[in-house]
Amino acid sequence: MNDSAEDGISNRAYDEAFLRDSHFTGDNDDENDGLMEDEETKLLADDRDPYTRGRQGNGGVNNGAVFTYEESLAAVGTGKFHLLLLLLCGWAVSSDAVEVLSVSFLLPSATCDLHLDSQDKGWLNAIVFVGMMVGGYVWGSLADKSGRRSVLMWSLTVNGLGGLLSSVSQVFWLFLVFRFISGIGVGGSIPVIFTYFTEFQARSRRGSMISVLATFWMAGNILAAGLAWLVIPHTSLGYFSSEFKYNSWRIFIALCTVPSLTSAAIFVLMPESPKFLLKYGREDEAIKVLKKIHRSNKSTAPFNISGLVLSLDETGKKDGGTVGVEESVDVKKGGGGCCGALCSMWENTLTLFRPRLRSVTCLLLIVNFTIAFGYYGLFMWFPEIFNRIDKNGGTMCEPGNKNDNSTSSNGTAVCEPVGDIVYLEGFLTAVSNLPGNLLTIALMDRIGRKILLASSMVISGLSVFFLWFVHERWQNILMSCIFGAVSTIGFNALDVLQTELFPTDVRSTAFGVQTGIMRIAAILGNVIFGLLVDVHCAIPMILVAALMAFGGLVSLRLPNTMGLDIH
């Protein structure tokens, strides 16, 4: 979206009206907020200091001023707290990336120890996504009921413990079970991390800050690839006996759990999201958190606050300057215990498919499915494909026969050392995400989320299609790097959109549902690739290309949330 053009202003007004009337507000917004539509749109689009309504005279704040949540975020400033928040949430995002992508790096070495064929490898890549599908929905719903911070601590702990236990598993089925448990933890932490982080960000910098957070996925990818390159080729590392092996690739898995376990421990020191506290009637606690952030940032602007409301819609007649009583009561309706949690999960899920959220929910489900099927279905297989090319020669779709004894009669690979070049290629593919991440940070708050998402998915689809035509090894690596770099732009834009398009009380649930469908797509992508890669890779390549291009076109129907308040 071009903010300087008149038609861009028209599109902006449309998106604001769409978000305000269809997604975030109740049926009687215009009656309750006391503002004409043009005035409200002007306030939403105002690029001046967002908390000028609480100021007077020469910059002093009215004693006892009532702030909207967006005004309070601007008033506390940006400083030490936000840097620490970014580093911690980024470390947690990296831990999820390490756990998800670690399996793809250990496949070449684990093949012999676990007696894997191509279908086993497909399921091993996919099982973490099965756990993420379950975990994303359950943890996300719990985060909307019980709070963000506690759910983050528990999900990161489950992630780390599952990975640690998988490293000592000596048989395939047990290894698969613990990878599933690890996936449950990853599935919970991913949606809640972005929700938690977003609710501390002011409107003016929200898109770019979420983009910066998303770059830590790349950092986790690089960390996993670097660890694999440093550890796995050293086959003499570990403990060996006739009944128990703890070799280099198992040490690699254990090291991959360090980020998640340390993140869980550090989150003990962090506050709950003030947006969550305010949404559920805990106004005093939300104000205390904001005051602590203000002190931590050492902001020069005073922050004298007596009341806090979510938005302009919730002042005056609606609730007398506080969060609505109706919202506080809703928190208690589900009751306590497992029954209350299940009722809350079901109610939040139904809310996503009611008229005011149905359209955006369904559009995002389509986009998530197509981008995940394409990216994870192909990217998780890159190390294995590079290993086959290294051993047999040829190309991605036309492997050579340099080593006719590379596989046994039942399709299981014969045990041979894995060359360092395989992990170097994986490392280069991971580093290739850097340009895409830098581009999204620079452009997210300038041209908008959906333009970046749509263009990324269409270009990614085209790059996959051309993988079929390359004939040299360096061409395979180059096209793989281009695919990873361009796909990263789409994932970052999607992360921003998913956190902005849903209201606070269902944001984590919505993110969990969306990531759930993403995991289903990732499972299907990995399994289909595993079934067809030994036949011919043309069919899965064409599927990936077509689905990603289709998803990019669908994303153009989403509203642009750039510069708008989240509710």
Image (tube, rainbow, N blue to C red):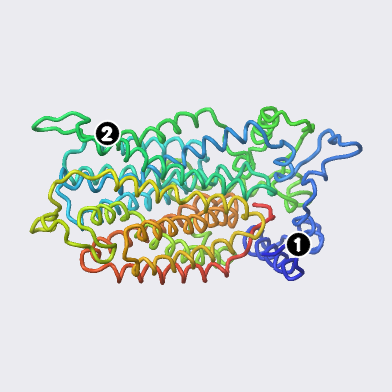
Residue drawn at 67 percent across, 63 percent down: 27
Q: Looking at the picture, does residue 542 appear above or below residue 77?
A: below
Q: Which residue is mark 2?
A: 251
Residue type marked 2: Ile
Answer with left or right where residue 480 lies relative to residue 283. left
Residue drawn at 35 percent across, 52 percent down: 129
Q: Position of residue 107 (x, y in %)?
A: 25, 48
**Circle count:** 2
Circle 1 sits in a helix, a strand or a loop, which is it?
Answer: helix
Answer with left or right where residue 399 lies relative to residue 295. left
Is there any visible trace of residue 517 in the rendered image? no
Q: Position of residue 48 (x, y in %)?
A: 80, 49
Q: Looking at the picture, does residue 181 appear above or below residue 258?
A: below
Report the quarter where the N terminus lies.
bottom right
The answer to which of 258 and 565 lies nearer the viewer is 258
Pointer 2 with pointer 1, Cβ within 8 A: no
Q: Position of residue 91 (x, y in %)?
A: 48, 37
Q: Which residue is mark 1?
A: 30
Residue drawn at 48 percent across, 29 percent down: 266
In which quarter of the view is residue 17 placed?
bottom right
Answer with left or right where residue 484 lies relative to residue 37. left
